[in-house]
Amino acid sequence: MSDITLTVEEESADLLMTITPAEGQPKVNVKKMEKAFKSSPYSTFLLIDGALELLFEAVNKADDNDEGKDNSAVFAIIANAVDSTAKVSLSPDNMSATLEITAGYGGKQFNNSSVVELLKEHNVTKGISKENLVNIVQQSLLLKGGKSISTEIALGKNSVNGENGYIKYLVGDPVDRILRPKRLENGKVDMRELGDLVVVKKGRKLARLIPPTDGQEGFNVIGDIVEATRGDAVCLEETEGSSFLNENKNIIISTTDGMPKHLDNSVAVHKVLEIENIDVGTGNIRFDGSIYVKGNVCEGMELFASEDIVIGGIVESAMITSGGSISIAQGVIGKKVSENDENENSTMLQAQGDINAQFVQYTDIFAKNDIKITQYISHSQIIVEGDLWVGNIEKDKADGKIFGSLVQSGGSINVGTLGSTSGARTTLDFSYWANTVEDLRIDADEQSTKIIRRLPKIYKLLAKAVKQEDNNPTKIERIKKALQQHLHILGKLDKEWLEKEDKISDHLETLELCVYQSILSGVDVTISSKTCAFKRDYDATKLQWLENDISVEPIVT
C-alpha cells in the first residue's frame, strides 16, 4: 500500500500529509487516509473539511499523469493546530467576572498563569477565586475540541450600609404591659397580673441615643472602592418630665417622679395617680396627669385624665376620657341604653392617643390615633382616626372578630373575621376624613359668615374714631386689634379645613381592609361614594380603593 506520513513543520500549526506510492502495493483511499490521521499523534488537530478528498484526487491524478514513470510523492495540508481560547465577561456593575474557556484542537492550552495574565488584561484584579481558577483550568484540559466551560472567576464585595441610629428605652412602658400581660410558668396568661406600676424616680435614666454606624466599604472586581452609606441618625429630645443628663445630649433622665411614656424620640414622665378601683367609694375622678387603676372602673363612673389612663381590670358602663392613651388590661363591657332605633351604649371611651383592650362590647369609642383590640368588638360604635387592629398583636395576621358594629376609620383595618352568623349587621365606613373635612368646612363657613357680618361695623367704628377731633389713640388701637383678630380667625378657619382636605385623597390611596379568615354575609363596606354589600360568605379577602371603585381580592395564604 502507498506510504502515508504526517509531519508538522517546526513552529507551524499546519499538519502535512504526504502520500508516496509504492510499486506493486495497493493504492491509498480516503478511508485509509482518515485512519492514519486518527491514529497519529496529531489526531486532536482540526481536520480541514474536504482536505482528505482533495488529496486523494491529487494522488489519483498524479498516478494517471505519471503512468509508466516512477511515482512521486503527493502532499497537502489536511489539518491545523488550534489554540484554546478564553473570554472574560464583566457584569454591568463590575461586581463579578465570568471566565469561559473553549478547548482548542491540538494547540496551546491555558494554565493557571496564563489565566491570571488574561484577567489582568481585562483589569480584573480583585475578588479572584483561586479555587475556581484552578478547577476551570483542570477541567478545560479534559474537554474535546470546540467544547466550552465557564465559571464565575471573580466576585466583588458589596458595601454594607451602616445601621440606623435608634432610641434605646431604659424603662418600661405601661401600655406595653397591657398589651403583653404576664405569662405564667404553665404557659397561660394571667390577665390580672400586671405586676407593679411602672414608676420612675427623679434622676432615673429613661433613654439612650444609639448613633448610626458608618458601614463597611466594598469593592468591585476591577479594584474600585464601593462606598458604604452611613445609617440614618435619629434625634433624642427632651420632653415633659425629662431632660438631658449632660451636654452630650445622648441620655435623658427624669426630672420628676411619675409614670413614663415612650414617645418616638423621647420618654415623657407624667404625674401619676394610683388607685385601686373607681367606684362609688372614690367617686368620679378628674386628674391633671396620668391615672393608674389597679382594678376596675365600675358601672356609672366617670374618669378623666389629661395624660394616659392605664386600667388593670375591666371597664363596665363607664365614661372614660383621656388626653393621651387608654390601655385596659381586660375588657370593656357596656349595654344598649336607647329604646329606639338609635344606637346608644352605656360605655364611652375617648382618647387623644391610642386605645388598647382585650375585648369591647356595647361601647362607643373615639381615638385620635390607633385602636388595638386583642379578641373582638361586639355591638359597638367605633371612630378611629388611625388604624384598627383586632387580633393578637404578636401575630403577623389579625385573628380577632368584629360583628354587629359600626366602624368609621381614617386609616386601615385588620381583622380575622368580619360579621356574624346570627345576621347582626356589621358596617365599615372609610369616610372619616371626608366627613371630618366637610364638618370643618361647614363650621368654617358658619363662623366666617358671622365674622364677615361684623367686619363692616368694625370698619365703621374705626373710621368714626379716626375722624373725631378728640382723637383717642387707645380707642383706635383697640379697634385695630379687634379687626386684626377677626381677619386672623377668618384666615385660620379657611386654612384648617383646606389643609385636611388633602387627607381625603391620601387616605383613599393608602387604605386597606384585610380580613384574614372570613367575611360573613350581612357586612357592608363603604369607601368614598361606593358601598360593597356582602350577601354571601367570603374567605380571606382584601379590599382597596382602585380606579374609583372598591377592589375585592382574595388573600392568598
Image (tube, rainbow, N blue to C red):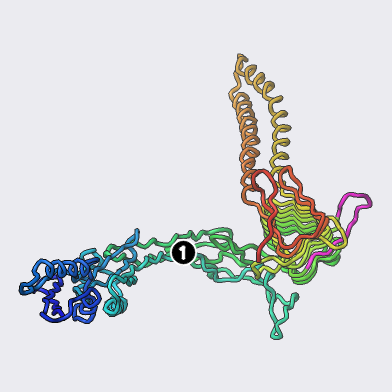
Classed neighbour count for the residue bearing mark 1: other residues with Cα under 10 Å, few (<14), some (14–19), many (≥20): some
Is residue 291 visible from the viewing direction of this image?
Answer: no
In the displayed orientation, state which residue is furthest to the right: 339
The answer to whether 536 is drawn above or below residue 491 in the figure is below
Q: Residue at x 7, y 72 (%)?
A: 68
Q: Seen in the image, is 443 located left or right of residue 112? A: right
Q: Nearer the viewer, residue 123 or 11?
A: 11
The answer to whether 501 is drawn above or below residue 450 in the figure is below
Q: Residue at x 73, y 32 (%)?
A: 446
Number of numbered discs visible in the structure rendering = 1
Q: Quadrant of the N terminus?
A: bottom left
At label 1, the amino acid type is: Gly
In the displayed orientation, state which residue is furthest to the left: 70
Q: Which residue lies under the disc numbered 1?
A: 165
Q: Nearer the viewer, residue 30 or 341?
A: 30
Q: Seen in the image, is 408 located left or right of residue 471? A: right
Q: Nearer the viewer, residue 223 or 538?
A: 538
Across and down, in percent, residue 176 comes to 65, 69
The main secondary structure of the magenta stretch is loop
Is residue 311 visible from the viewing direction of this image?
Answer: yes
Q: Quadrant of the C terminus?
A: bottom right
Where on the picture, by quarter, is residue 206? bottom right
Across and down, in percent, residue 127 comes to 30, 71
Q: Read off the magenta span.
A: 331-344
Q: Is residue 262 shown in magenta?
A: no
Across and down, in percent, residue 534 comes to 79, 54
